[in-house]
Image: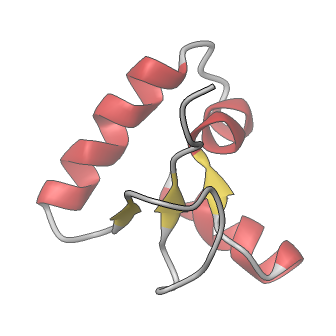
Amino acid sequence: MLAASRARIADHGEAATVREVAAAVGLASPSSTLYQLRRLEEAGIVRLARAPARGTTGSADVRRRPPH
């Protein structure tokens, strides 16, 4: 997940959404992906954005899409 997030930033200049991370690591459920990302956030490895769908504040920043 961390590698997928960093690759998105390197390739596109912006953080990946949870759905993009899920697709990159082969997970079908964004919910499962978000669970894993939250564990990484608790460990201080990534920072999840709470607001806009995109934007980079760190090399391992991961963005959540706003509710539909």
Question: Which residue is nearer to you in this view: 65 or 3?
Answer: 65
Q: Quadrant of the C terminus?
A: top right
- Measuring 46% from the left and 60% from the top, which residue is drawn there? 51
Percent x, y of residue 25? 64, 36
Percent x, y of residue 20? 71, 42
Residue 18 occupies quadrant = top right
Q: Is residue 5 above or below residue 1?
A: below
Residue 14 occupies quadrant = bottom right
Q: Is residue 24 above or below residue 29?
A: below
Give the side of residue 34 with respect to residue 52, left or right. Answer: left
Q: Residue furthest top?
A: 28
Question: Which residue is nearer to you in this view: 45 or 31?
Answer: 31
- Measuring 30% from the left and 30% from the top, which residue is drawn there? 35
Q: How is the image coloured?
A: secondary structure
- Measuring 71% from the left and 76% from the top, which residue is drawn there? 9
Give the side of residue 65 with respect to residue 7, left or right. Answer: left
Percent x, y of residue 1? 51, 50
- Measuring 38% from the left and 57% from the top, which residue is drawn there? 50
Percent x, y of residue 2? 49, 60
Q: Is residue 49 above or below residue 24?
A: below
